[in-house]
Image (spheres, coloured by chain):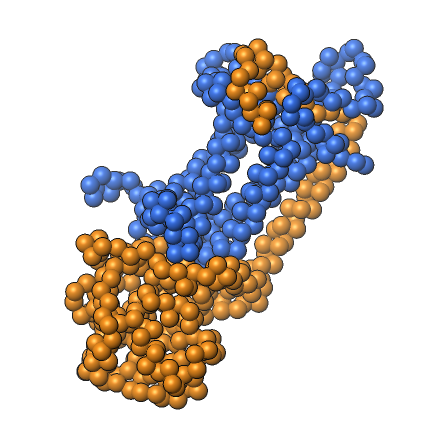
Chain colours: A blue, B orange
Amino acid sequence: MKDRTSSVSPTMTSPSVPVMAADESATSHAEPHSVASFKHTRASRWMHWINFPLLTIMVWSGLRIYRADVQDPFGVGIAGWHWFNLFPEWINESLGLRRKLAKGMAFHFTFGWFFTLNGIAYAIYLARSGEWRHIVPDRRDLADVAAVVLHDLKLRKATPPQGRYNAAQKVAYSGVLFLGFTVVISGLAILSPTQLSPLTRLLGGYEFARTIHFSSTIGFLLFFVTHLLQVTRAGWSNFASMVTGYELKKDVK
Amino acid sequence: MSELSRRLTESADERLARLAAEAAEGPTISTAEYSKRSRRSFLTGAVAAAAGIAGFRAIQNRPLDGRTPDVLRKGYEWNEFVWETLGSQSKLAPTYALADATSIRVNGRLGLPDNYDLSTYELTVKGINDEVLETFDLEGMRTLINSFPQVDVVMEHKCIEGWSAKPRWGGAVFADFASRYADDVPSTYGYVAMETSDARYYVGVDRATMLNRQSLLATKLGAEDLSLAHGAPLRLATPHKYGIKSIKQIATIRFTNERPDDYWAERGYTYWAGF
């Protein structure tokens, strides 16, 4: 059976017209019925799910590297008065991250390449397929983000207009792509600060490149928590669409 | 990109129409077809997930090479290949003004016995067939190092554990030292092996990195002679490798074609350890 999604190529110039499946007999019924509508392309689904374990390995191995130095650069304090560590010992202990630096590096420096390749492939795919249109926010989206968040928190009734994704999703998805970019660039600046010394200098030096690298990771973790929460809220049919490509819609007229 | 310019110039109503079209993009299928797709996709997903988990387990169960699964050792070597191909050993690392120098932690004490008696120090230089080329006692070594042009420079020292410092090193350029043995050692040697007096800490560094003019045989840290903890009387200081390669208290320097044993590479770390 041929995958329909791959034959859908959104045109860049004319407004896209919904492409209906030719063999769709159910749509002629007037009574409420269930259909499934297209949501995620096959390429997006594969790259999304390939990215998940890769990013998990990168964070897991990265924390092992981070942990190798006794001092926690993300500890928060003012003028030598230490308040708390961002990754305190008990977190590392409970994750089984007990100073296994070599293992962390071996995984990080091997899987980093796969993570980067998957990211580059996705960026090229977004640009070439036109899928970027669904993810990149326009200026009115930027203004709508707060309204979407208020709506999700049930503090506001009306939903701002949206395409495939709402304004907050677009900003979050673009943002996490940008994090992917900063984490790879800063990672390279740390990995090869002599060979790539102009890049390291551009990022404010070795130490600041490290800060960017870790901050990006924290950004990924924040995204991940929000993403899980929102996917849970959105329900099974939405989750399944990331696997099947189609979202089941019940009782459509 | 016309789509971009359209987005920048569209009116609010045009935007609404565009968003509606975007939301409706793509085909709609019947529930029967959806079920078929769903079964197939979840099955594919389950197989892929199982393969991924099996793969991750398989990596950790691979035969060890230097206490690292051999496939990850290949990963290290791939990184080495990439940066060596780009020629990072011959590049110069950034240097800093003397005023920007910082102190440096004492992090590694391997091969540095507590009650080391400096007066017993001896430096042995060996050639390609492990033959002794020269030996020096403490004074002889100092005289030798002082006979080369002296370097006084601030370079970044990066520990593999993550911290970095900008120590000020003083001493001789290793390449100048190596040229003393140009008649005895063919210029094609691959590595330099170095060991502490008790031979409990040892490193191997590739020739290109050792011959980089920034790889120093240091006798001074700041304006002072090296302390024992920092590797007195002679240590390597190179900004082109993680600190694990900047061996302290060098007692043996051997030119070799074989890749020498390396303390941390035997314990799961990258052999190359460069930037």
Q: Nearer the viewer, residue A253 or A43?
A: A43
- Does B213 appear above or below A3? below
Q: Nearer the viewer, residue A134 or A130?
A: A130
Percent across and percent down for residue A37 are: 70, 24
Q: Nearer the viewer, residue B56 or A166?
A: A166
Q: Is residue B69 visible?
A: no
Q: Residue at x 65, y 33 (%)?
A: A129
- Residue A143: where, in percent of width, then height? 45, 18
Q: Residue at x 53, y 47 (%)?
A: A116
Judge from the rendering whether residue A242 lies leftward or rightward of residue B184; answer left or right: right
Q: Is residue B58 visible?
A: yes
Judged left or right of residue B56, residue A93 is left
Residue B58 location in percent, x, y? 61, 59
Q: How many marks?
A: 0
User: Residue A200 at x, y = what percent?
Assistant: 38, 49
Q: Quadrant of the C terminus of chain A?
A: top right
In front here: A187 or A237? A187
- What quarter of the picture does the N terminus of chain A occupy? top right
**Quadrant of the image occupied by residue B177:** bottom left
Q: Quadrant of residue A78?
A: top left
**Residue visible at 76% across and 25% down in the picture:** B29
In the rendered view, tell whether residue A236 sits above or below residue A104. above
The image quadrant of residue B153 is bottom left
Q: Is residue B33 above or below residue A184?
A: above
In this image, A227 relative to A42: left or right?
A: left
Residue for point 50% across, 11% down = A157
